[in-house]
Amino acid sequence: MAGKALNKANLMALGPETLADLLLDTVKGDAARQRRVRMALAADQGPETVAADVRKRFAAIRRGRSYISRKSQKKLGQELADLVQLIEAQVAPDAPDMAFDLLWAQLHLAAGIHERTDDSWGTIGDVMHDAMEAIARLAPSLTKDPEALAEDVFEAVSVDGYGAFDHAVHALAEALGDTGLARLKALAEAAREAPLTDADRVLYDFITDPAQREARARAARDRTVEMILQDVADLQGDVDAWLARYTAEQLTFHTIAPDAAARLLEAGRAEEALKLVEDAGPNDDLWLDKADLDEAHFACLEALGRTDDLRAALWRRFETRLCPIALRRHLNLLPDFDDIEAEDAARRHVATFQPIEAALVYGLQAPDLPLAAEIVLTRHAEIDGDAYEVLTPLAEALAPSHPLAAVLLWRSMIDFALTKARSGRYTHAARHLASCAATDAAIPDYAGHPTHDDYLRALRSAHGRKSGFWGRTG
């Protein structure tokens, strides 16, 4: 149907009465959209009216008991996200403390919602994270008593079973200030020394052995307390208190060592940071790239002025991981003209690197498309057509300037899909074949590889009965 485009300008030209009729018709039978419109109408009546409507909606969600399906979960997630925006836009400017109370109340809804739905997709978790980020933006404007706020934070984090309040201490750091952080630390330390309560134990009633039940409950309680103490130590710049949460062995874990090293570096303790990183061991696991550990190592060497060691470490990361960022940093540290020789050596290293897919990824990321094309042309027999997540974007990047290399990549994916009878990939394979045909005119010399017509004939001869594929080639 020809006509005006559906855009804001054309809609405004319809006039308010027509738009109101259209809106009423659109929201008819859709409770979620009706609530959204009501909230927008309430926005003109001041923050108190908006807050009253938001609290009313929170109360309704809190009363809910039925299971929330995936479809309903998406709607609820969108509604909660809209409420966060509404609170920030309509309440926070004039009443930041009220806006905080509303956002805090929304975070308290997380447990009840999680108990009624499967949040494998992270829909609810994401919107609660957004609410916490909104609180962080509000924090500098809050006028709440810091000690009372610390008590609210401590209580919320202590009973939080779904991570909604994980970042509360950092989000509210400015509002807590030194007084609030001190109170929070005192509460956590007292809780760590206190005997377990019935509330601590109730979650582990399923464990029949009393000693095991007690141990599990204490471990869970202590983890929460230590998390709070570590956040406080972080904000107070107390590196040793932050480190004290971990054992000497845990500080060598690649998931912990980089953060620990960063804090030591910030405190001017570079030698300690370097030792900690070195104790964590080399990043030589081919299946797990501990990039954060390498970055921490580089930062330590740089802080200590050990330029030669830094250059060697950067080259080692490039050599083992084909990391283009590490190579660029290495080259920038070399004297004039030495970088040209080093760059040539790096390209030779990439050209023979195993597996070939890693070399192709490097060519795309560096970016160095001439090198990627050279690798494809000289080592095309090694290419695994199943690596479509690498080959597809590389072929598209190579097509304008290196059409033959692009065609060889498309052919690898086509051959894999047909030879392995991967019917789910036939649509993609047909699209790749069309790309080969469209690129044919740009290739004056196939350099010993079959021309497009020859390849097409061979493909029909070998896979002519795969109608699921040929039917898609049009």
Image (cartoon, helix red, strand yellow):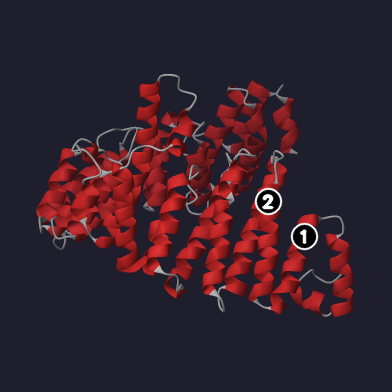
* Quarter of the image where one finds residue 105: bottom right
Work out whether mark 2 precedes mark 1 in sequence or the reverse, and give the earlier one. 1
- Residue 314 in sight here: no
Choose between 396 and 148: the one closer to the eye.
148
Marks 2 & 1, CB-CB < 8 Å contact: no
- For the point 45% across and 70% down, the residue is 144
Q: Quadrant of the N terminus?
A: bottom right
Q: Secondary structure at mark 2?
A: helix
Q: Identify the residue at horizontal 45%, vertical 58% (top origin).
A: 152
Q: Give coordinates of residue 238: x percent, y percent.
A: 21, 57
State the residue position of label 2: 61
Residue 48, position as x, y percentages in the image = 65, 74
Residue drawn at x 52%, y 73% is: 96
Residue projecting furthest to the top? 209
Q: Residue at x 59, y 28 (%)?
A: 417
Q: Is residue 343 left or right of residue 12?
A: left
Decide: is 229 above or below 180. above
Nearest the camera: 9 or 230?
A: 230
Pick the front one: 154 or 244: 154
In terms of image quadrants, where is residue 415?
A: top right
Q: Position of residue 418 (x, y in %)?
A: 61, 26
Q: Amino acid at mark 1?
A: Arg
Q: Is residue 15 above or below residue 344?
A: below
Determine the secondary structure under disc 1: helix
Which mark, by number, is residue 33?
1
